[in-house]
Image (cartoon, rainbow, N blue to C red):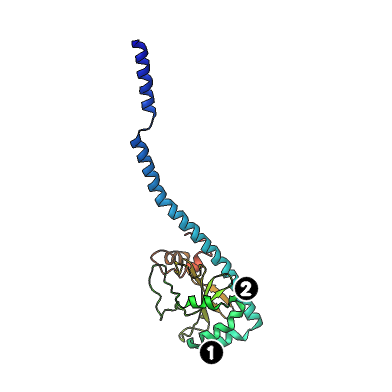
Amino acid sequence: MNLKMKRKDWTWLKMTKNAFTIAEIIIALFLLVVVASIFIPLNITNVSQAERVAKWKNTYEETKYSISALKAEEPEVFNELSTLSSSDSAKAFSIIKPFLNVKYDSNSLKDLKKYRYKYLNGTKVKENSHFYVDQFAILKSGVIIGFKLNNNKSFSENSPKAIMLFDVNGIEKPNRIGKDIFGVNIFSDGVEPFGEGRSKSIIKVNCSPVGSGVMCSKYYLIGGNF
């Protein structure tokens, strides 16, 4: 009898050692929740940014093609851009629009009146900034396009004739340069992304949470991480 009791006691003791207590299970679940709360949002953010960057790359290639077509069919346009002032941005934009697959939608244009955007670090883009644009349209792809003539007389002949911004996310937020907004300089012989000609180290710093994000346009085209 005593031998049987001892065996039962030993078996119960082994089961107790091998089993998890309720406290251990609760701690394990808590740790899983903490880890998930950290990494799942990061993964979602990375996926979203990857989609935006992919759209930007496609938009950039389409824009290069469109400007090349414009130059071939209407070569005098670029000479005309040099003679126009900033107040003529609307006129210049109307000339370029037919080559950009713009969607003429009055309802969409009403939404654009409320459209605002910021730099990557959250700073407001002021009206006197080179990157402030107030001429907008929506492409058939849903991308918002902004246009502005460069009328800075101190710039040389090799300076860009105009700039274009592209919000690949449309009206939806974050509406931040470097997140979902990218841009190009328009020259007489083609387009270049913002940040072209700068070193990779400078571009990387600019395309960080403390930077303006302007050079992200180039950074992501050369395979930069996000």
Instruction: Confirm whether residue 222 shows in the render.
Output: no
Along the line of sight, the residue nearer the viewer: 28 or 58: 28
Q: Position of residue 165 (x, y in %)?
A: 50, 74
Residue visible at 39% across and 30% down in the picture: 19
The numbered disc on residue 103 is none
Q: Position of residue 82 (x, y in %)?
A: 54, 87
Quarter that holds the N terminus: top left
> Which quarter of the picture shows residue 18?
top left
Left or right: 112, with 211 as reference point: right
Secondary element at tag 2 = helix
Q: Earlier in the sequence, mark 2 or mark 1?
A: 2
Question: Is 215 drawn above or below residue 36 in the view shown?
Answer: below
User: In the image, what residue type sits under mark 1?
Assistant: Thr
The residue identified by callout 1 is: 83
Question: Is 208 drawn above or below residue 17 in the view shown?
Answer: below
Left or right: 119, with 162 as reference point: left
Question: Is 60 drawn above or below residue 159 in the view shown?
Answer: above
Judged from this view, the residue extending furthest toward the right is 73
> Which quarter of the picture shows residue 154?
bottom left
Residue visible at 39% across and 46% down in the picture: 33
Graded by Cα atoms within 10 Å as few (under 14), some (14 to 19) or many (20 or more), the crowding at tag 2 reads some
Residue visible at 43% across and 51% down in the picture: 39
The numbered disc on residue 65 is 2
Judged from this view, the residue extending furthest toward the top is 1
User: In the image, what residue type sits under mark 2?
Assistant: Tyr
Q: Position of residue 132 (x, y in %)?
A: 44, 78
